[in-house]
Image (cartoon, rainbow, N blue to C red):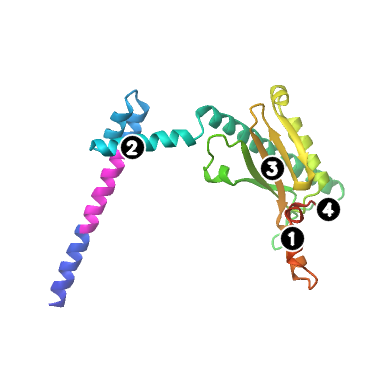
Amino acid sequence: MMDERRSKWEEERWKREEEWRNMQEQREEEWKQWQETEQSEITPSQVQQSAGFASREGDNNDNKLIMKLHDEIYPDPTELTNIKNLVKVTEDNLKTISDTMRDETEAELKDKGLLKEPVEGEETVETRVLKGCVRVGDLANGLLLKGDKSLEMLVFCTDKPTVYMLQNVKEKFEELLTEAQKKALKVTVESNKGAFVVTDPKGFSVTVTMTSKAMERTLLQLVSQPMWQPRSWTGRTVCEFWTS
């Protein structure tokens, strides 16, 4: 009796799984058809029908309303192009700067005899000053709306970033710009925020803030001190650069 029940249960389970796979395949096929029709020159109503959006007139009107509202808040193609170009220039230049500063650090350590061949079991000397960059905020989450022109990025450093390092990165960034980019883009330093800002003629700007895990450890040490008062915590304290 138990074997018969188990057999029926397994048969029903496999049947449901087969129906689920068929439904998934159907959805994937509809999505492919929608992508193909989107690239062709057809009317929006035909695209919606081919994608299986709505068959009733009321639902079709709802889709039109949603698409209209979406177009009102979503950045237009011109804005997206400006954002894409500005972010690409910033990320490419930061990667080049990171490689350049690594080569400079290795050359300096070699001249002083401090850079040796890595030995198994020993910690290697970190020569990359800028570890990497990451998009943050609405730029990272893809939540930019029409009219948003302020973008944010973070650069992670091996050691605590200093004002000298910030100025050095800014100068190297300007050197990497082409003649046309130098005329179009403006690069400014905001030491109180530990960042530099790249602005294009259309008003779009990327704020590149430099930070480090070493700063987090220092802040945790300050918090652990008995005399630490939470009300003295300010935005400037978190973003302040180390000048030593």
Question: In the rendered image of this protein, does residue 40 appear above or below residue 135?
Answer: above
Q: Secondary structure at mark 3?
A: strand
Amino acid type at mark 3: Val
Amino acid type at mark 2: Asn
Q: Which mark is residue 233?
A: 1
Q: Secondary structure at mark 4?
A: loop
Residue 124 part of the magenta-drawn span: no
What separation in Å lies between label 4 and label 3 (alpha carbons)?
32 Å
Question: What residue is shown with label 3?
Answer: 208
Question: What residue is shown with label 2?
Answer: 63
Q: Quadrant of residue 149?
A: top right
**Mark found first going from the N terminus, 4 or 1:** 4
- Choose mark 2 or mark 3, whichever is in front: 2
Q: Which mark is residue 114?
A: 4
Question: In the rendered image of this protein, does residue 66 appear above or below residue 177?
Answer: below
Question: In the rendered image of this protein, does residue 34 appear above or below residue 165?
Answer: above
**Mark found first going from the N terminus, 2 or 1:** 2
Residue located 64% across and 44% down the image:
153
Q: Residues within 10 Å of mark 2 (few under 14, many from 20)?
A: some
What separation in Å lies between label 1 and label 3 (alpha carbons)?
22 Å
